[in-house]
Image (cartoon, coloured by chain):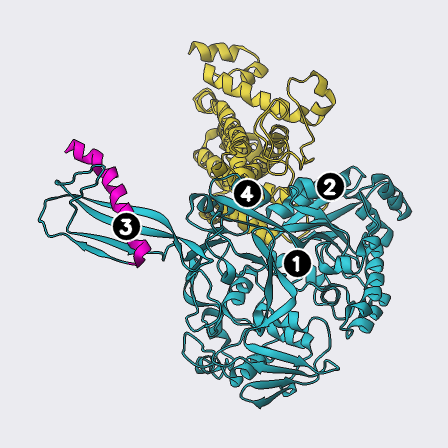
Chain colours: A yellow, B cyan
Amino acid sequence: MTTLSAQRERGTMARIFVGPTVGMTIRRSLFFFMVFLAVVAPWLDDFSHWLPFPIYDPLRPDPFNPVSPPTAEHWFGTDTLGLDVFTRVLMATRVDFTLALIGVALGGGLGCLAGAWAAYRRGWVDMVALRIVEVLQSFPVLLLGLAMFAAFGSLEIFGPVDHGMAVLVLSISMVNFPLYLRQVRSVLLPLTEAEFVQAAKCAGLGAWGIVWHHFIPNARGQILALFPLTCAYAIQIIAGLSFIGLGIEPPNPEWGSMIKAGATLIVQGHWWVSVFPGAAIVISVYSLTGFSARSETLVGPGGTSA
Amino acid sequence: MKMLWKRVPSVIAVVAAMAMVAVACGGTETVTVTEEVVVTSIVTEVVTEEVVVTETETVTEEVVVTSIVTEEVVVTEEVEVVVTETVEVMVDDSEARTLRIAIADDVEQLDPALGSAQLTNLVLKNVYMQPVQYRPGPDVGGFSYADTTSFEGQWIESWDFSDDFRTITLRLRQGLTFPTSGNPVTADDAIYTINRALATGPAGPAWVWGNIGVTSIDQIERVDDRTLVVHNARPSTIVLPLMRDQTMGIMDSVTIQANSTEDDPWGRDWLKQNYAGNGRYVVDSWDRGSRMVLKRNPTWTGFQPYFETVELLTVPEAANRLALLQSGDVDIALDLSVQQLQSAAASDGVKVLSVPDRNGINVLLNNQAPPFDNVTLRKAMSYAVDYNAIVNGVLNGQAVPSQGPISVNSRFFDLYNLEDAWIYEHDPDRARQLMAEAGYPDGFEFEMVIRQDIPLDEAVATNLKAQFADLGIDMSIRPVTGAEMFDHLFGLTYGGMAFRGGLLDYVDDPYYQFFLWWDSQDAAINWTGFADARIDEILDETASVVSDPGRREPYREAVTRLVDAAPMLWLANANYTLAMRDDIGGFTLHPDGLLWFATLNRSG
């Protein structure tokens, strides 16, 4: 408890960086380190003189140096095309983190609103929402992704946005929408008859007003606890879909497609092409779980007050 | 007992020595010992031995020696061996006479009339008997090229052209039998085969017969049981090369008719899965999706192939094909990537054959849509390519830079002095200048379509993307399925460029390539949408010219015009590469690049 109270005394910023345990703090530091690298990655080339590691163009193959093992020139080796694995793992962080974040925010946001609305209205609205959720959740994730690509694959409907990435984001949203809807609905269902809701109604607040001002804030703890975990899950889905060749257009760097590029090389002893992007996924998922502590602190009695 | 165990190797050696003597004396021999003894162990040993088959031929045989060892065994310098009740020496070479090939996919189907899929073509060539085949050329260091100027008759024994090349007399080989049914091969089968081809067209053999000039069965006259006359044929240099096409095999008309129905008068459904031919090999069994077993044709009386059995094993993952080859479980692995071939070459017991070939590593440009409907821009792209990076980097030096539509490894390249026609080299400044002239001084965007999951396609596309980026050109890459690729190519719906692995003309002749690719009216695969009236004219003028002096100048002009118009990027001519166990020999490269099993043996 000392840790908890000490933490509460610090500012909000500090609470984001410092977890309730040492392990959590390490995971969070890892996460912010990766985010930092992802943000600065495109400019690293300009500062290559000051960097301890050599940096390359992630899209420029060196056909004369394919499948080179890790060396001082190529920290993580090169792949079959002669692309530098280190630079690509770094650059892929941008792609994977950004897509995961947008996808979860989009699907989660809509899921929260729909969940709160279903909990408030109950009746047929609730029933329809639940049936939609059940249909969406009855598909295995990869199958859902495949179906999305089959449905939108040949439609040029996203304008200037990269087509594959847009469908990936949509797929992530489709997976997260039911998760958030169910979670938020289950938390808020008991509150429909709560006194403060009745009071709000008496005060003349409209349905959306009540949902927005009184329902959603009450689910905040659940949402914040779910968010890092679903982001971690989304990264795995993106990598999974890319692994089966959907989403990111080659040769753009992405962890899943990089693992795939090296998968057949492992039996020949060329482990580095797959192992480093695989490690990047593991580390990013592990680091994101460092934030799930929010569930302990926020779902408790102190966290649920509106 | 311990001492005895130590002696076992010595005993084996002695028994093996006896076995070798026995084999050398000729075949299986049984030694009977009268004394009754106690058996202590049974030892089986495989001894490899060279056996002289003829004065000139030596083959390696495996001898399985089984010995039963007793307590009385004494081994001395003078060798007193009390052995066993019997010592059996068996010569078992069925393993050695089996060729195992790992292929990337199941054989698509077996009907020659449908043709055109790669593995179907490979099997059809070996299990059906074509009218003619190329003779193998001389050995040139462990392999040979087929002699494309010399043919030997297969189901036709000999042929005669009339003076105007419009009438061809075909004399059928006598005494042939279809091994699976026992039916004799007759003139009726020949006519049925041609008729079926024409009726089930336009793909496969119908296309081939059409280019020979046969579009109706009425053009085939049956003179007698062993003579057919083809009337009103189209004179060209490629009549015989077309007749060796893998889809031209003679078929068992009796069997096919017995398996035809009213709805399916040509037995198409049955022939997709079944076999009615008489090639050097016959289809013995086929487990869809896993393996096809071919057996040597017992009715063929000519030169006998070394391998009695050929097993085609479907192994979809290239890495697994390589692993099977390295472990010795297969003798040949097809479709390996450049890196995998490198790994294979470095493995014990594996060799990689790399043979200069006409295989074209070419990028197709859509000549009918912006931006590459602009000839100046197409030429700019030809100067923008770093040919050295493709040849020595991507293809690891297993290629030579291309010099236009006719491969530098074609015999016609030297014959027609085509090196003069080639004008391109890696010259970024010239490329920039031409881009500016074409109205794109600051670069442009376009898309390249490639097949997904094909390492070579990905490598070529990725390298070109980086090379073009230096000139401010933004090329995006879109991988598609094989079927989508065909739709794009035939429909000319790809954005700017398309790349589809190695492109090989099955016949080494400029006429074949030009009518296949560059005839703006009738080209079978005009995948670039290129059209040039003068080239069409040259093709019309030379189509019936059957001697090379008469074709030399027209084709030089056509090639020069084509190179100048740059309808595609001719990057390289890749070697034919094949990874195999190092005891496999007798490889002959045919112009169609399809592996010919009949000359392979285990003496490499």
Mark 3 vs 4, N-terminal side: 3
Task: Give the alpha-carbon distance from disc 3 to disc 4, as whole Å.
Answer: 41 Å
Query: What secondary structure is marked by label 2?
Result: helix
Instruction: Read off the residue under disc 1.
Output: B504
Please name the predominant secondary structure of the magenta segment in the image. helix
Task: Give the alpha-carbon distance from disc 1 to disc 2, as whole Å.
Answer: 21 Å
User: Considering only vertical position in the picture, is B314 above or below A237?
Assistant: below
Chain part drawn in magenta: B1-27
Q: Residue B388's mark?
A: 2
Location of residue B209 (image quadrant):
bottom right
The amino acid on which the numbered mark 3 sits, given as a three-letter code, is Ala
Residue B486 in sight from this viewpoint = yes
Nearer to the camera, A206 or B131:
B131
Question: Taking B313 as reference, is A168 left or right?
Answer: right
Instruction: Read off the residue under disc 3.
Output: B19
Residue B20 spot, x, y in % from top left: 31, 50
The amino acid on which the numbered mark 2 sits, given as a three-letter code, is Asn
Mark 2 vs 4, N-terminal side: 4
